Image: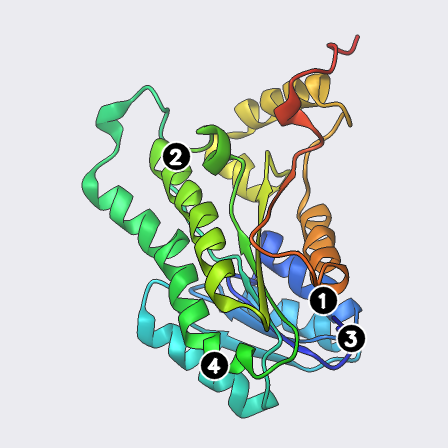
């Protein structure tokens, strides 16, 4: 699809992957809606960077776990721009808990992660469905995770919620055509503050070094690399839907020799 003068909502775009995706879309001439749950300052900074590229940017608070917030977010977008071409379901959360520590997760932990990571994405698509179907070509990108495919990651609850998001992507792809394409991106280890804070700097550094030693491409994902993949799917893959794209430098292959 043509991104110039199109309109995209990127949930959870006040920092990290969401911010990088909003900026990448803006760089292609796409007007963007910057969504945040709590980080209003970050959202405003991202919006200003997008506007500096010559596009319009709307900042809108919404918690995607709340259905009414999702509907308000879409309504505000349509009131401002009159159209919606792209939805990037990036908002997500986790609880860091060693997978072996089965006592470290509660029912409420699972429900909270699912409410944001999985149900939130569904609610956003439902709220945006009518507007997306008005376009001849529209795209939904669900930011899932390698955790949802391999059962690794920050916690079992997180992996389960992202696995459900992969399944959600396939289910939605079947029913959202022919106007709307629905695809998922599954990043592996993502360099940046979010993982460094969650893992602790020492563990983060050791993990990053270890992955670089086994990855065929000798590195891991970054927010910009993930954003570039999202833009590539949206702008160049109009005949692809229901697919899951892994971006981890090939780490999931586990075939590269250890580097010396």
Quarter of the image for residue 50 reads bottom right
> Is the C-beta separation of discs 1 and 4 under 8 Å?
no
Q: Secondary structure at mark 3?
A: loop
Q: Residue at x 47, y 81 (%)?
A: 130
**Lower sequence index among marks 3 and 2:** 3
Q: Mark 1 or mark 4: which is in front?
A: 4
Q: Position of residue 152 (x, y in %)?
A: 46, 28
109 left or right of 169 in image: left
31 left or right of 177 in image: right
Quarter of the image for residue 151 reads top left
Residue under numbered circle 1: 25
> Is the C-beta separation of discs 4 and 2 under 8 Å?
no
**Lower sequence index among marks 4 and 3:** 3
> Is the C-beta separation of discs 1 and 3 under 8 Å?
no
Q: Callout 3: few (<14), some (14-19), or many (20+) C-alpha neighbours within 10 Å?
A: many
Q: Residue at x 55, y 23 (%)?
A: 202
Residue under numbered circle 3: 29
Q: Mark 3 or mark 2: which is in front?
A: 3
Q: Which quarter of the image is occupied by the N terminus? A: bottom right
């Amino acid at each position: 699809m043509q991104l110039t003068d199109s309109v995209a909502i990127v949930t959870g775009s006040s920092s990290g992957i969401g911010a990088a995706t909003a900026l990448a879309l803006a760089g292609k001439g796409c007007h963007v809606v910057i969504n945040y749950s709590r980080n209003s300052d970050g959202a405003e900074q991202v919006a200003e960077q997008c506007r500096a590229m010559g596009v319009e940017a709307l900042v809108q608070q919404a918690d995607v776990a709340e259905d009414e917030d999702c509907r308000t977010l879409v309504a505000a977008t349509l009131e401002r721009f009159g159209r919606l071409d792209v939805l990037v379901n990036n908002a997500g959360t986790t609880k860091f808990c060693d997978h072996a520590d089965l006592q470290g997760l509660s029912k409420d932990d699972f429900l909270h992660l699912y409410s944001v990571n999985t149900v939130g994405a569904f609610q956003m698509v439902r709220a945006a469905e009518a507007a997306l179907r008005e376009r001849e070509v529209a795209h939904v990108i669900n930011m899932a995770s390698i955790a949802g495919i391999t059962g690794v990651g920050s916690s079992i609850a997180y992996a389960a919620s992202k696995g459900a998001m992969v399944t959600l992507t396939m289910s939605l792809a079947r029913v959202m055509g022919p106007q709307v394409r629905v695809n998922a991106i599954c990043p592996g280890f993502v360099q940046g503050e979010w993982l460094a804070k969650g893992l602790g700097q020492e563990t983060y550094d050791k993990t990053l070094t270890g992955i670089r030693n086994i990855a065929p491409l000798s590195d891991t994902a970054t927010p910009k690399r993930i954003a570039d993949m999202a833009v590539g799917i949206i702008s160049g893959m109009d005949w692809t839907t229901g697919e899951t794209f892994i971006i981890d430098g090939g780490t999931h292959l586990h075939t590269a020799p250890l580097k010396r």
